[in-house]
Amino acid sequence: MKPYLKSFFIAITVFYSLSSRAQDATKWTPKDIINTQFLRSVKFSPNGKIVVWSRRKGVKKKDRFVSNLYITRLEVKKDSGFLSLPLTNGNDNDYNPLFAKDNTSIYFLSSREKGKKLWQISLYGGEAKAVATFKDGISNLQWKDKNTLLYVSNEGKTLRESELKKKKDNVLVVEDEAHWKPTRVYAYNLKTKQITRITHNKKPLSNYRVSPNGEWLVYTMQMSRHYPSDAQPDPTYFLKNLKTGKTIQVLKSLGFPSYGFKFTQDNKGFYFTSETDSNPQWNGAGIGLLYYFDLAKSSFSKVNLRWDLGIGGGFDVVGNDVIVSLANKATRTLAYYKRGKNSWQKLKMDFGVK
């Protein structure tokens, strides 16, 4: 079995073992729903021996939800699963964990100290330490290479924002298109401590993804402040070659919003989803379809899911293949799509869980 596929099955095992402990034979109550704990942000170490993940739970005294980081050591068996240990255990939200390339520590973001710092914690114990402070904020960490982290931030306060602060104006501005401050992708070098702006989008960037080899970057630019309320106009999508610096607009002919960009392990393309309906004017009322963008051809094609109901819960790339959560009316079902030269073979997945 391939290492990355084996890692996926281990993650499923860890998830079900954690979920089974929280199950109860009685019916759920509103209190049960509020106190449900969620497993998120599952990441494997470069050597495939450790999993880091976050557990989100409600804290009654604080009247809010808190996320802490945990690790599961896949080389250490415990009971019917694997040994899991907490990395953080406070009342702050710790999230977006990434393993260091040398397997010795984890970088992460946190709400502690106003959420503007990059943190690092050793896998061998000890307190988390602040690596750097980002006065204009930091979010959505991704590796470009072993020494460079990409993140999303902005250029700081505009002249207008500074003037309003001087006047102590407490007016809340809503949907101000003329003074819409863009967020962009930046690079932070862990050795030189240098920050470099990567994208130059004129409007806010909503999400991005970098290829495993750090050569390609695909990102989404929002076109209006009112998009969440009327889904108009559609976002625009750009592909940047981080070696040459060339940026091109992509997916212009698709006609529907696209989400969830994920590169293949061979760095030859990326998968993404798009919701399609009979009337493009009303985005969001259709079914989810899966597409593949070929970097060499600079074009995309639809993956034949062989399933009329479309995607129901996202997808994950495994090597160059993809695992898809398919809509199944009131439930969902998983399918594995093995990529060939020009097509995908659908394989059924059965975990023996009822």
Image (cartoon, rainbow, N blue to C red):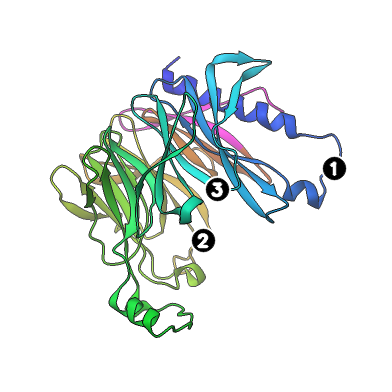
Residue 350 drawn in magenta: yes
Label 3 amino acid?
A: Asn
Location of the C terminus by quadrant is: top right
Residue 212 has which mark? Answer: none
**Residue 249, quarter of the rendered image:** bottom left
Q: Secondary structure at mark 2?
A: loop
Q: Which mark is residue 27?
A: 1
SS class, disc 3: loop
Q: Residues within 10 Å of mark 1 (few under 14, many from 20)?
A: few
For mark 2, does the 10 Å Cα neighbourhood hold few (<14), some (14 to 19), or many (20 or more) residues? some
Label 1 secondary element: loop
Residue at the spot 82% in from the left edge and 48% down from the top edge: 29
Query: Which mark is drawn over residue 284?
Result: 2
The tally of labels here is 3
Q: Nearer the viewer, residue 46 or 350?
A: 46
Amino acid tagged 2? Gly
Circle nearer the N terminus (3, 1): 1
- Which stretch is magenta? 333-354
Q: Amino acid at mark 1?
A: Lys
Residue 47 part of the magenta-drawn span = no
Could you tell me how far apart the alpha carbons at marks 2 and 1 are, in whole angstroms? 33 Å
Q: Is residue 153 left or right of residue 122?
A: left
Residue receiving disc 3: 93
- The x and y percentages for residue 234 are 38, 65
**Nearer the camera: disc 2 or disc 1:** 1
Q: Nearer the viewer, residue 318 or 201?
A: 201
Residue at point 68%, 48% (across, down):
58
Whether 178 is drawn above or below 46: the answer is below
